[in-house]
Each structure stands twice: as structure tokens, then as C-alpha cells.
Image (cartoon, rainbow, N blue to C red):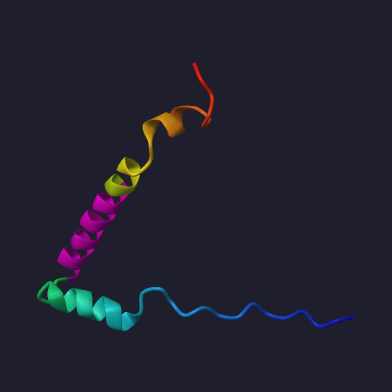
């Protein structure tokens, strides 16, 4: 029976150094850094929603009503 290979571990998307830098940018306040992250995430979501055509979302492309 062939041996199963374990999936390769991926490097984290955000490293501890990244987190330390974000907290440092917020004057050492982790709560403020977290708040900034949520604000940025919300803004990215709003931009992404605006990038999708409302006509495409409502019906299949090419379909005429």
C-alpha cells in the first residue's frame, strides 16, 4: 500500500511580525489595531460588492426579460 503524503504546511498569511507591526502602528493598542482591521475589512467588502454588476447578480447573463 502506498504511503499517504501529508499535505505541506503553508506559511501563515499574516505572520506574528505583521501583527506586531500593526499593533506598533496603533501605539501598542491591540484593541485599536483590531478595530482598524475591521474597518479595513468592511471597506474592502463594500468595494467588492460595488464591483459586481447588479444585473449579473439578479439574473443569468444573456437572459432577456
At 49% across and 16% down in the image, what residue appears?
65
Q: Does the magenta stretch include residue 34?
A: yes
Q: Which residue lies furthest to the right in this view?
A: 1
Residue situated in front as seen by the camera: 31 or 42:
42
Identified at 85% across, 81% down, the residue is 2
Q: In this view, does 55 lie to the left or right of 41?
A: right
Where residue 50 appears, as percent x and y from the top left, is: 30, 41
Residue at (38%, 36%) from the top-left corner?
53
Q: Along the horizontal axis of the image, is 19 left or right of 55?
A: left
- What residue is rendered at 49% in x and 27% in y? 59
In the rendered image of this protein, does residue 13 appear above or below residue 34? below
Q: Give the camera-side residue of 36 and 53.
A: 53
Among the 4 quarters of the image, the one containing residue 19: bottom left
The chief SS type of the magenta part is helix
Which residue is the extreme one toward the left?
27
- Residue range corresponding to the magenta coloring: 30-45
Q: Residue 42 appears at what percent x and percent y?
A: 26, 50
Locate residue 11 relative to residue 5 in the image: left or right.
left
Q: Is residue 51 magenta?
A: no
Residue 15, percent across and down? 35, 79
Q: Nearer the viewer, residue 15 or 30?
A: 15
Residue 11 at what x, y percent from top left?
47, 80
Up-down: is 43 above or below 62? below
Q: How many numbered marks have been drawn onto this rendered protein structure?
A: 0
For residue 30, above or below residue 52: below
Q: Specify the quadrant of the image occupied by residue 29.
A: bottom left
Identify the residue at the far top of this view. Answer: 65
Q: Is residue 64 left or right of residue 43?
A: right
Which quadrant, please, contains the N terminus? Answer: bottom right
Q: Nearer the viewer, residue 63 or 14?
A: 63
Residue 52 falls in image quadrant: top left
Amino acid at each position: 500500500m502506498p504511503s499517504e503524503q501529508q499535505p505541506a504546511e503553508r506559511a501563515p498569511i499574516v505572520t506574528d511580525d505583521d501583527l506586531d507591526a500593526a499593533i506598533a502602528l496603533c501605539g501598542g493598542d491591540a484593541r485599536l489595531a483590531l478595530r482598524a482591521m475591521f474597518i479595513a475589512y468592511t471597506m474592502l467588502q463594500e468595494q467588492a460588492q460595488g464591483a459586481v454588476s447588479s444585473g449579473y447578480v439578479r439574473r443569468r447573463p444573456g437572459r432577456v426579460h
